[in-house]
Image (cartoon, rainbow, N blue to C red):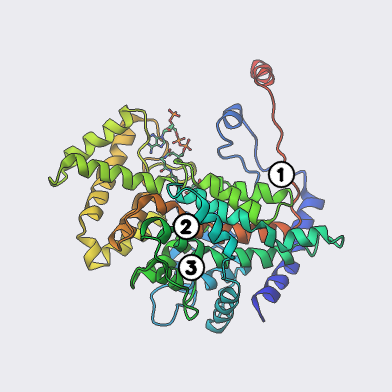
Amino acid sequence: MGLKEKLEQKIQEHRPRTTKLMKEHGNVKIGEVTIEQAIGGARGVKCLVTDISYLDPQEGIRFRGKTIDETFDCLPKVPGKQYPSVEAFWYFLLTGEAPTAAEAEEVIADFKARSTVPQYVIDLLRAMPRDSHPMAMFSAAIVAMQRESKFSAYYKSGQFNKMEAWKPMYEECTDLLAKLPAIGAYIYRMKYKGDQHIPSNPDLDFGGNFAHMMGVEEPYDDVARMYFILHSDHESGNVSAHTTHLVASALSDAYYSLSAGINGLAGPLHGLANEEVLRWTQNFMDKLGGQEPTKEAVQKALWDTLNSGQVIPGYGHAVLRKTDPRYTAQRQFCLENDGLKDYPLFKLVSMIYEVAPDILLEQGKAKNPWPNVDAQSGVIQWYYGVTEYDFYTVLFGIGRAIGVLANITWDRALGYPIERPKSVTTEMLEEMAAKG
Ligand code: NMX
Ligand code: MLT
């Protein structure tokens, strides 16, 4: 059974559960909202539903019920490689089942058939000022392809059927995802590699072809697979996932929705933190002027950052209350790699890990003093020669697309309505507060 047929089967099985919950248990309370939550960014308010991933504050992310290690273990690996293909993972996120090697190969072939980037996207990227941020380029490239939308064409066809709408959405999410490695690599080489480009290799999978088009040698292909899978999904409340879902809830197509989500990812409190971590460490190294970093110097630099009103990038989290297992997975990758283990930047990042939590605890503001995914990801990129850190959030964006596109396919499958929470005025809150 192909992926689309398997997905259809899963959707048919799932729909009665959602219908039953809505019809028979729609008035069961799952939480309350306080004034602090209404003003404070809806932290902890349970008002989104997804089965694709779940974030436990202590344990971290599970994809379709599996931890990071279980996820990597259950998926077929690319032959001769350490990590599974992104295509196998896409199958898993969509269906909740690990594909066989043959099923994964089918998805790889399907992605290849959809991977050509239209020339007008290249023209658009070339027309943008070369110093545009890579995330602005990435987002613009995605929204430019809206004219290809199969979902919008279906909506306009006059035959729109809510139960069938996931099909064109699935098609265009796959179309869009399959093109992202080539778009990312084009931006990278246009901006940083003298505008010299490397044509796609049709024999390679998503991660392998990305590494090839970036012009970075093995094992960067496995790094890319690991990186994209780790960054794919973090349940639905984070800014990029929530934005993508929100925009799609208006029946905007995948191009509009993903572009909007990518714009949210570009903020320094969200995905741009991976760029900020490298900017911070490079500034720190520059100030040291070639001297070995000491714990005392790191402590002083972290306090200087806090005292100047800035956050320590890569630390803290809105949900997590422990070290992010995505941080740990990447740290483990470094520790198991002889070159990386002794790499000065890795040692510095490890030293920050030793001192930053205590400093954040002493400062007493951050609810979570532990590192998140962004604190570790740049080191690996840097080690493999991708040192242009303003590109790092594009890497996050390619990964994040896998999760959010799987989510909006399911949004259409389950007929989720337009999202429209209610607002109140400050005066109303004051009245409610007075009543207690
Ligand atoms: N450095 C300094 N202050 C911090 C940090 C940090 N790393 N994390 C939280 N705080 C402060 C926060 O700014 C807030 O201060 P104030 O009361 O003055 O506004 C206070 O601690 C309470 O914030 P929290 O409730 O702990 O965190 P919140 O849920 O509001 O925000 C983040 C979560 C992730 C935005 C926040 O921890 C942060 O800014 N971290 C640094 C940026 C970062 O690493 N972002 C990447 C997150 C993961 N990702 O990839 O998206
Ligand atoms: C993410 O991966 O989206 C970040 O860790 C932020 C979040 O979950 O809020």
Question: Residue 382 versus residue 94: which sits nearer the camera?
Answer: 382
Provide the secondary structure element on which disc 2 rests. loop
Provide the secondary structure element on which disc 3 rests. helix
Q: Residues within 10 Å of mark 1 (few under 14, many from 20)?
A: few
User: Measured from the top left, where is residue 352 in percent x and y?
Assistant: 26, 45
CA distance for labels 1 and 2: 25 Å
Left or right: 312, with 416 as reference point: left
User: Measured from the top left, where is residue 256 in percent x and y?
Assistant: 65, 52
CA distance for labels 2 and 3: 13 Å
Residue 295, quarter of the rendered image:
top left
CA distance for labels 3 and 1: 31 Å
State yes or no: Cβ of the residue under disc 2 lies below 8 Å from any atom of ligand 2: yes
Return the residue at label 3. 71
User: Measured from the top left, where is residue 33 in percent x and y?
Assistant: 64, 33
Residue, x 68% and y 73% (percent of image)? 4
The first of marks 2 and 3 along the sequence is 3
The first of marks 1 and 2 along the sequence is 2
Q: What amino acid is labelled 2 in the image?
A: His
Q: How crowded is mark 2: few (under 14 residues within 10 Å), some or many (20 or more)?
A: many
Question: Which image quadrant: the C terminus?
Answer: top right
In the rendered image, the residue lying farthest to the right is 158
Q: What amino acid is labelled 1 in the image?
A: Glu
Question: Residue 435 versus residue 194: which sits nearer the camera?
Answer: 194
User: Measured from the top left, where is residue 59 in percent x and y?
Assistant: 45, 53
Question: Which image quadrant: the N terminus?
Answer: bottom right
Residue, x 61% and y 39% (percent of image)? 45
Return the residue at label 1. 419
Return the residue at label 2. 231
The first of marks 3 and 1 along the sequence is 3
Q: What amino acid is labelled 3 in the image?
A: Thr
Vertical comparison of 307 with 297: above or below = above
